[in-house]
Image (cartoon, rainbow, N blue to C red):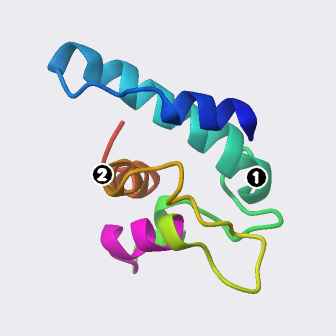
């Protein structure tokens, strides 16, 4: 978790040439941190599946809100202290298969 905080607290410039680096960082977070609970293939584990099929009925904005606020009473933490709304929406779109 500490390495994630360091990565996320570092500045993520918005320029086009840095956008790929930002996407790579967010993809790494999904694979390593989300994958630790939701399964490395996102097919579920401690957390529910995060596959495009499993998320198809949920809007990206709703997924982003869950990422940012967590789910009380579950192991899903709040990521708002570490992720921006833009980052959470990128992750939601990525999980739904819209961003690669």
Foreground mark, 2 or 1, reads: 2
Q: Residue lying farthest left?
A: 16
Judge from the rendering whether residue 86 lies leftward or rightward of residue 70; answer left or right. left
**Label 1 sits on residue:** 39
Q: Nearer the viewer, residue 52 or 5?
A: 5
Q: CA distance from mark 2 to mark 1?
A: 24 Å
User: Is the C terminus in the top left, top right, bottom left or bottom right quadrant?
Assistant: top left
- Residue 70 in the figure: left or right of residue 74: left
Magenta stretch bounds: 58-67
Label 2 crowding class (10 Å Cα cut-off): few <14, some 14-19, many 20+? few
| The quadrant where residue 99 appears | top left
Q: Residue furthest bottom?
A: 73
Is 55 within the magenta? no
Q: Is residue 65 magenta?
A: yes
Please tell me which of labels 2 and 1 falls first in the chain.
1
Q: Secondary structure at mark 1?
A: loop
The answer to whether marks 2 and 1 mark residues whose Cβ atoms lie closer than 8 Å is: no
Neighbor class of circle 1 (other Cα within 10 Å; few <14, some 14-19, many 20+) is some
Relative to 10, residue 50 above or below: below
Location of residue 15 (image quadrant): top left
Residue labelled with disc 2:
86
Residue in front for this viewpoint, 53 or 27 = 27
In which quadrant will I find the N terminus? top right
Residue 65 higher or lower than 32, as above or below: below
Q: Nearer the viewer, residue 62 or 73?
A: 73
Q: Position of residue 26 (x, y in %)?
A: 48, 36
Residue 97's x, y, as percent? Answer: 38, 50
Q: Residue at x 58, y 31 (%)?
A: 28
């Amino acid at each position: 978790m500490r390495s994630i905080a360091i990565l996320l607290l570092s500045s993520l410039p918005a320029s086009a040439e840095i956008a790929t680096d930002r996407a790579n960082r967010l993809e790494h977070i999904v694979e390593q941190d989300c994958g630790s609970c939701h399964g490395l293939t996102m097919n579920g584990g401690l957390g529910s599946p995060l596959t495009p099929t499993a998320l198809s009925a949920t809007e990206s904005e709703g997924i982003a809100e869950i990422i940012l606020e967590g789910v009380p009473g579950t192991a899903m933490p709040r990521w708002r202290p570490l992720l921006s709304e833009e980052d959470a929406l990128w992750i939601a779109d990525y999980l739904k298969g819209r961003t690669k």
